[in-house]
Each structure stands twice: as structure tokens, then as C-alpha cells.
Amino acid sequence: MPSIPAILDDVTYVDLVDDNWRVVEIDSDGWRVLNRSPVHFRRARGMLPLPAPEPGGSIADLRPFLNVETDDDKDDDFVLVASFVAYALGGAGPYTILAVSGEQGTAKSTLTRIVRSVIDPNVAPLRRPPRDERDLMIAARNGHKRRTASTSSRWNG
């Protein structure tokens, strides 16, 4: 059973992780909230509900919350983050990795917390890097997205 999202017959389903087990159904005609899901989802401990989508929203509504370049001529950083969010909710691979870099104090952790809260809210928005491959697999299975604190000391040496 998948955690969020899942694909069935070219339709993507995103579990809202609410008490009523509602899902968002996304297809070529748009999206709609269903009260009953045709897909059975697995919910790991610690998952928090996603907000239900509202008509008229836009991915651009995230811009004020993200510390990315805001110059009209340089939209690349926002486009990368927005693309990551869209791919994360798409349900099928290849799966993307969002690598955030910057000087100390540039809100890297804040950006990743915000992105995770949009696509996979959890009681533990920031976790330590896994000790080994087994821990990585357990964490990946129990969460749609994996967000760790800086991994420079663990993986770059």
C-alpha cells in the first residue's frame, strides 16, 4: 500500500491524511476532493493532515514563504522548488531530490520545513541523517519525503 501519493489508471490520488480518509483525485480534467478513495493508503505514525486544496490557488502563493531569488529576471530558484513540489505530489518516478545550499543563516532549514509541510507534513519535520542504509530505508518507507539536517559531515568525507 502506498503512502501519499498513488496512481491508478492514469489518475493520481493524494491522501489528505484526515480523519475522514478523504483524497484529492488529480487527472487531465483537473482535481477534486473525494470522500472515498479507490486506493488504500498506508499511514505511518507521525503523519499530519494535508490542507484540502481550494479553487483558485496557485503554486506562486508559496513564493513569499521561501527564501529564494525574487528578481524578475532570475526565477530559476523558485521554478526548481515549485517543480520539486509538483513532482513530489505526482506519485510516479523518477523521484527528484531537492538539494538546498547556502551560507549559514540563509533559511535552508526553514525552506525545507515549509516544502515538507506542503507535501508531507509530519510531527518530525527535521530529522538527523540516517546512521546506515537500513535506517535510510526505514525512514523512506515511513515518509513520502525525507528531510534531514545538514549531511555534510556524514556523506562528504
Image: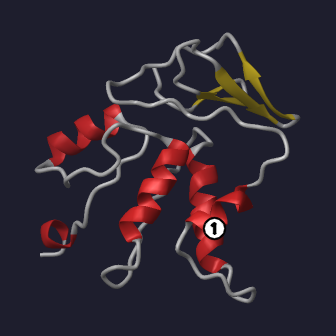
Colour setting: secondary structure
Q: Name the residue under label 1.
A: 64
Quarter placement of the C terminus: bottom left
Q: Is mark 1 on a helix, strand or loop?
A: helix
30 relative position to 43: left or right: right
Q: Which of 98 and 10 is in front in this view?
A: 98
**Above or below for 130 versus 62:** above
Quarter placement of the N terminus: top left
Three-letter amino acid code at disc 1? Pro
Going 64% across and 51% down the picture, which residue do you hit?
86
Residue 144 occupies which quadrant of the picture? Answer: top left
Place of residue 22 in the rendered image (x, y in percent of width and height, measured from the top left): 63, 18
76 relative position to 121: left or right: right
Going 36% across and 64% down the picture, which residue do you hit?
109
99 relative position to 10: left or right: left
Going 47% across and 40% down the picture, which residue do you hit?
120
Place of residue 128 in the rendered image (x, y in percent of width and height, measured from the top left): 19, 53
User: Is disc 1 surrounded by few (<14), some (14 to 19) or many (20+) residues within 10 Å?
Assistant: few
Place of residue 62 in the rendered image (x, y in percent of width and height, measured from the top left): 64, 60
Residue 134 in view (yes/no): yes
Residue 98 in view (yes/no): no
Which residue lies most toward the right here?
A: 29
**Above or below for 54 versus 148:** above
